[in-house]
Image: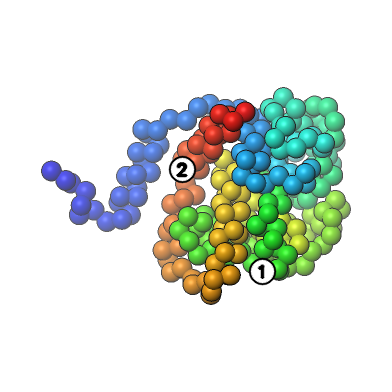
Amino acid sequence: MADTLTLKKDELISRAQADMQSKLSIPERTLREKVALTCRILFDGGHDSGLAGQITARAEEPGSYYTQRLGLGFDEITAENLLRVDEDLRVLDGDGMPNPANRFHSWIYRARPDVRCVIHTHPFHAATLAMLEVPLVVSHMDTCVLYDDCAFLKKWPGVPVGNEEGEIISAALGSKRAILLAHHGLLVAAASVEEACVMALLFERAAKMQLAAMSAGAIRPLPEALAQEAHDWILTPRRSQLTFEYYARRALRGA
């Protein structure tokens, strides 16, 4: 006998979230492994642009974070060849040097104690949208993870290797989890590596869908309350972990 057909949506959502937490397991991974897997996942998702782009995550030691070594592409990153650097980009662990553009990550981490991972990439569709100086428009259920959570920096401040760019980008990001940087690319600042990885993938998908929709007609807006509901549903930590693990399995099968 069915006993859930009279329950309200918020009750069903709560049940589903509890079930995801108690009935679905995820493998234990170190922070280094998650960062390295994110590099591989984003490479598979079309986020590679030569040596451009950075993925960082706060390390266990305060004032430091993990990032990839300059000279390696996303598809070459492993847990072993990651660097740990301080806010001045001095290498604390590992060999080589980080991308000098990591400087603006330090500014974001200082401004946002809630942020544990920053992803900045130049994927084709997000970069194309950035060339138009058009903000990201979220108008589909699948991409509601970014609904009312994506800022826009319309003026390009130049190559982001100076402190000026760090100030500008961190201020433009504000309290949101994502930002489209005009004439540049996307950036995600999230509470976990898994959340950041999933959001970056969906950011590029949203940009691709937006460009296709713009070529066909006017994009129609989502109902605000329902879009916010979808945003909160997709962004639950467990759902981010489960989605990340799916993409991790795909990346590992292709390794």
Element under disc 1: loop
Front residue of 18 and 145: 145
Residue 136 appears in the picture as rendered: yes
2 and 1 marks in contact (CB < 8 Å) = no
Front residue of 193 and 186: 186
Q: Is residue 130 above or below residue 39?
A: below
Q: Is residue 24 above or below residue 233?
A: above
Residue 200 drawn at (x, y percent) = 61, 49
Element under disc 2: helix
- The residue that appears at 81% across and 57% down in the rendered structure is 165
Residue 40 left/right relative to 182: left
Q: Residues within 10 Å of mark 2 (few under 14, many from 20)?
A: some
Front residue of 96 and 30: 96
- The residue that appears at 54% across and 67% down in the rendered structure is 213
Residue 245 drawn at (x, y percent) = 51, 35
- Say which amino acid is labelled 1: Val
Q: Which residue is mark 2?
A: 239
- The residue that appears at 64% across and 62% down in the rendered structure is 151
Residue 4 drawn at (x, y percent) = 21, 48
Q: Quadrant of residue 45?
A: top right
- Say which amino acid is labelled 2: Arg
Q: Earlier in the sequence, mark 2 or mark 1?
A: 1
Residue 79 drawn at (x, y percent) = 68, 27
Image quarter (top left, top right, bottom left or bottom right) of the C terminus: top right
Q: Which residue is mark 1?
A: 134
